[in-house]
Image: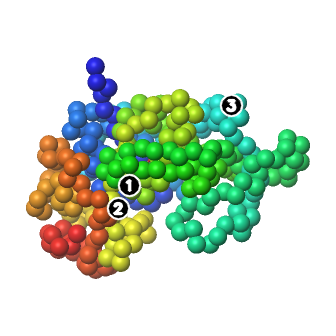
Amino acid sequence: MPQSVIGRFAPTPSGRLHLGNVLCAMLAYLSARSQGGRFLLRIEDLDIPRCPASLSQAAMDDLTALGFTWDEPPLYQSQRSEIYRQALHCLTEQGYTYPCFCTRAQLMASVAPNLGDTVVVYPGTCRNLTGAEAAEKAKTRTPAIRLRVPDETITFTDRLYGVQRENLARDCGDFILRRSDGLYGYQLAVVVDDALSGVTEVVRGRDILSATPRQIYLQRLLEYDTPSYLHIPLLMDGEGRRLAKRDRDMDMTALLKRFTPEEILGRLAYAAGLQQEIRPATLEELIPMYDPAKLPKDDLRLKGFDETTAFSPSFFFRPEML
Ligand code: GLU
């Protein structure tokens, strides 16, 4: 019997949901539902101080207002430390981890400033500390825990962007599984949660495409299945900057005051190539229109975006705006 599809949306509630998050939720939802699959919600509030409960609730309220439903109670990463601890323990037992005592300032000083994006390849300072050296350092500093990655290339096929390759040692380096303040790393949490929830397909923003090989490597070490991956283009503003939580006028509080859920979803479905004209639509109406072959690869640029036009009805009704 073919495995049934389980998709998910996994927002980080460090701000209100914005239009880019909703595009991601919409495509993840339509993909799962169009295959008769289940859809889960996971609140990625690992970084507890930055993700207050009020923002998790606001994200769920916005999703509900837009017509999303999920098939199980949402998972909260902030409540799952014990599960991540067990996974980390399993990796440590097998010798895949080591304690890292480097401070942030030391790390920043050791890397070239022009690495672009956010990937900082760890230079391996603490990789080969002896037990005695580590014990000495542990007297004054609580270490982070890193995964020791091999000089190995991970290859996978993204359903939109095609074959992806990344050499773990060269392109990402030993990465953090638990921070020195005790918070678990995103890569570990996402891999554990997707696997234990039985997620079979991951639909999420292209910004996480380059983290996927790390996640696939962790899945292998933990003997989990690898889901299918479909990364989607990002929504950009008129200057080509990614929409972010700082753009308060694009958040759902603001947009739901001015537009109906159907107008917002219909506009996003047009931008994503699912419908040929701009017309309001419910999520249910969009399910039969979903086809991953229609999705654009290029980031979706909000042409003419600025503080005043982003709000205007023309943003929703003039096709050239996206
Ligand atoms: N929490 C991540 C975000 O909000 C998404 C993680 C994922 O989908 O794997 O960008």
Quadrant location of the N terminus in the rendered image:
top left
Which comes sooner in the sequence, label 1 or label 3?
A: 3
Asked whether mark 1 lies closer than 8 Å to ligand 1, one says yes
Q: Nearer the viewer, residue 211 or 241?
A: 211
With 142 as the anchor, is 55 left or right in this view?
Answer: left
Mark 2 lies within 8 Å of ligand 1 (Cβ measured): no
Question: Dot 3: within a 10 Å radius of its alpha carbon, few (fewer than 14), some, or many (20 or more) residues?
Answer: few
Q: What element carries label 3?
A: loop
Residue 162 in the figure: left or right of residue 174: left
Q: How far apart are marks 2 and 1 (CA)?
A: 6 Å
Residue under label 2: 234
Mark 2 to mark 3 CA distance (whole Å): 38 Å
Name the N-terminal-most of marks 2 and 1. Answer: 1
Residue 216 falls left or right of residue 309: right
Q: What residue type is labelled 1?
A: Gly
Q: Is residue 9 visible?
A: no
- Check disc 3 and give the amino acid type: Gln
Q: Mark 3 sits on what residue?
A: 94
Residue labelled with disc 1: 205
Q: Position of residue 118 (x, y in %)?
A: 54, 63
> Which element is circle 2 on?
loop
Q: Nearer the viewer, residue 72 or 120?
A: 120
Q: Earlier in the sequence, mark 2 or mark 3?
A: 3
Query: Mark 2 belongs to which amino acid?
Result: Leu
In the image, residue 188 lies at what x, y percent? 56, 42
Looking at the picture, how far across and down is residue 290, in whole percent?
Answer: 19, 46
